[in-house]
Amino acid sequence: MTPDPSLASHNQPRIVIDAVGFVRSLINPRSAWGAIVFDYAPLYVVLMSNELEDEIRSVLERPSLTRKFDFLSDDLTPVLMSILQDAERVPLAEIPPVCRDPNDDKVIATAMQGNGQLIATEDKDLLDMGEYEGIRIVTGLELLRMLRE
């Protein structure tokens, strides 16, 4: 069931979705990630930094991914690119080292700089943190449950 965009409040949650979430939404649009990215997008604000967008685009262009999922360039890729373009931009002056995987620091920095409330990910390094400075770190299924409530 797709939510009615008119139900979105002005107090929408501010969310950072990591690269894996966006990629999984394209691989399986009927998955939890597909619902989050394509169906429930009117209910939250996507926070995006240039560094995070560069990672998302880089992952989507990986030959191993494009060979395995050659349909990724079909109908939903332009929709995803539009979502990335329309996201609220967050400039990252610095990216402090806070996660055990330094590649995940940009996700946390994006949430911090954008006054984010949630980070949605399947990355164990991030999920093991649980939260950082009041920002909850949740799986896609947890986020989907929250959006459906």
Image (cartoon, helix red, strand yellow):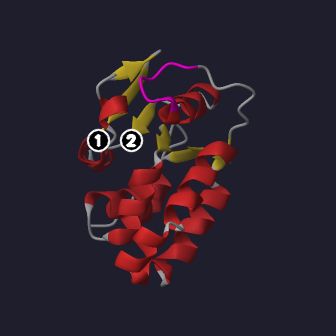
Q: Quadrant of the C terminus?
A: top left
Q: Main secondary structure of the magenta part?
A: loop
Identify the magenta region: 97-102
Residue occupying image coordinates x 65% and y 44%: 51
Whether residue 63 sits left or right of residue 130 in the image: it is right
Query: In the image, is residue 54 above or below residue 119?
Result: below
Marks 1 & 2, CB-CB < 8 Å contact: yes
- Asked if residue 4 can be seen in this view, the reply is no
> With 145 as the anchor, is 23 left or right in this view?
right
Which of 54 and 89 lies nearest the eye of the viewer? 54
Task: Give the CA separation, mark 1 to mark 2.
Answer: 5 Å
Indicate whether 99 appears above or below 148: above
Name the amino acid type tagged 2: Ala
In which quadrant of the rendered view does residue 115 lie? top right
Q: Secondary structure at mark 1?
A: loop
Q: Secondary structure at mark 2?
A: strand
Residue at (55%, 20%) from the top-left corner? 97
Q: Return the residue found at the far top.
A: 133
The image position of residue 22, as x and y in percent, is 44, 58
Q: Earlier in the sequence, mark 1 or mark 2?
A: 2
To which residue does mark 2 refer?
120
- State the mark number for residue 75: none
Q: Report if residue 27 lies within the magenta region.
A: no
